[in-house]
Image: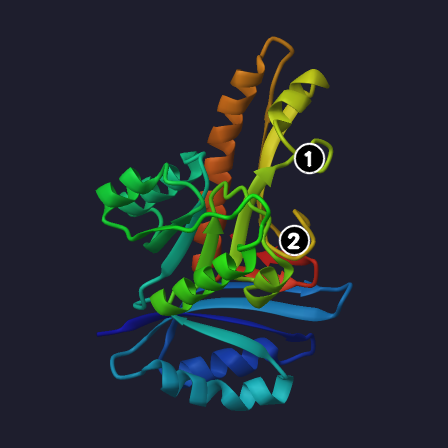
């Protein structure tokens, strides 16, 4: 049967890139269903995403061989995603489970094409949810003095490798990841946080926002880096609030926004619509 693939590429911009790639795909009798491209004039870098259907008998290895001359000629960095392959994720969560529950729901109804290979938590609160969904639950607490933090993160890395997960999702996981962990999985960990950071860092950010009389709240999904909450941004959303809203009202509104933004970011990543561009991202919606 025909197979669907997604090709992403980036390289220094110059004439002939699109023609070189599409000519090879046409020679394979592949049919392009979606094409997006962007030229970053500041860096001189060209980005492209192509979704296409290959005829029966044309597999990933054959596509990569056909594209190799173009890749070498233009010095492309490429990824080729076989849409038939299961998209597995590991979700990490602490006590607040709204973002986790929203992800599970979007998977259940088919909007998000993913399989949760494991749920990791430093608390036991979400075990019942994992049991209900039939997902392996790994309780990996972190000591108050952080003495076992390195060992705990090594266990998470082992799980990621063992499950074949291509993405780690921090669904309100309230532990700061170690630098080596964040570096090891750069571009493979997505976090969700409040858009009004860094103005209101630390505990009870919605209470801090209420005390300052903010008029807009929101959430930001980003890739994790060793620099806390400063990784490349994938998706954001805001909502207007009023003086009449209590901290609990802000928290309720924030939970909804966080859940939606994280789910959209995960979907964009799994569909290969996000490409890293230094400290920024190129997102093909």
Quick check: 19 left or right of 225?
A: left
Residue in front for this viewpoint, 203 or 197: 203
Q: Residue at x 34, y 46 (%)?
A: 111
Residue occupied by mark 1? 201
Quick check: 26 left or right of 21?
A: left
Q: For the N terminus, which image quadrant?
A: bottom left
Instruction: Tell me how the rendering is colored.
Output: rainbow
> Residue 160: x percent and y percent?
42, 64
Q: Residue at x 31, y 64 (%)?
A: 86
Quick check: 15 left or right of 25?
A: right
**N-term-proximal mark, 2 vs 1:** 1
Do callouts 2 and 1 mark residues in contact (Cβ within 8 Å)?
A: no
In the rendered view, tell whether residue 58 sits above or below residue 31. Answer: below
Which quadrant holds residue 118? bottom left
- Please state which of the two labelled residues, at mark 2 or mark 1, is closer to the viewer: 1
Which quadrant holds residue 224? bottom right
Residue in front for this viewpoint, 278 or 44: 278
In the rendered view, tell whether residue 47 sits above or below residue 74. Answer: above
- What is the count of numbered marks? 2
- For label 1, the SS is loop
- For label 2, the SS is loop
- Tag 2: Cα neighbours inside 10 Å, few (<14), some, or many (≥20)? many
In the rendered image, the residue lying farthest to the top is: 244
> Residue 92: x percent and y percent?
44, 49
> Residue 239: x percent and y percent?
58, 26
Residue 244's disc is none
In the rendered view, tell whether residue 132 sits above or below residue 44. Answer: above
- Tag 1: Cα neighbours inside 10 Å, few (<14), some, or many (≥20)? few
In the rendered view, tell whether residue 41 sits above or below residue 135. Answer: below
Residue occupied by mark 2? 231
Q: CA distance from mark 2 to mark 1?
A: 16 Å
Which quadrant holds residue 278? bottom right
């Amino acid at each position: 049967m025909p197979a669907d693939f997604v090709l992403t590429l980036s390289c220094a911009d110059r004439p002939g890139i699109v023609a070189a790639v599409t000519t090879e795909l046409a020679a394979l009798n592949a049919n392009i269903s979606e094409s997006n491209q962007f030229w970053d004039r500041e860096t001189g870098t060209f980005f492209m995403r192509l979704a296409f259907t290959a005829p029966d008998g044309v597999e990933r290895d054959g596509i990569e061989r056909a594209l190799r001359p173009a890749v070498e000629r233009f010095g492309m960095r490429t990824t080729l995603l076989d849409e038939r392959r299961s998209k597995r994720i590991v979700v990490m969560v602490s006590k607040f489970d709204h973002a986790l529950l929203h992800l599970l729901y979007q998977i259940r109804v088919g909007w998000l094409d993913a399989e949760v290979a494991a749920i990791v938590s430093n608390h036991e609160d979400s075990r019942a949810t994992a049991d209900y969904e039939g997902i392996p639950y790994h309780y990996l607490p972190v000591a108050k003095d952080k003495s076992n933090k390195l060992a705990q993160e090594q266990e998470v890395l082992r799980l990621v490798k063992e499950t074949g997960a291509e993405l780690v999702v921090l669904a309100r996981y309230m532990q700061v990841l170690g630098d080596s962990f964040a570096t090891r999985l750069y571009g493979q960990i997505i976090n969700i946080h409040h858009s009004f950071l860094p103005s209101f860092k630390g505990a009870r950010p919605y209470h801090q926002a209420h005390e300052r009389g903010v008029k807009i709240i929101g959430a930001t999904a980003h890739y994790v880096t060793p620099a806390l909450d400063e990784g490349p941004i994938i998706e954001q959303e805001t909502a207007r609030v009023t003086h009449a809203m209590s901290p609990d009202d802000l928290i309720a509104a924030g939970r909804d926004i966080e859940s939606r933004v994280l789910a959209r970011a995960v979907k964009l990543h799994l569909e290969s619509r996000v490409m890293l561009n230094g400290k920024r991202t190129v997102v093909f919606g």
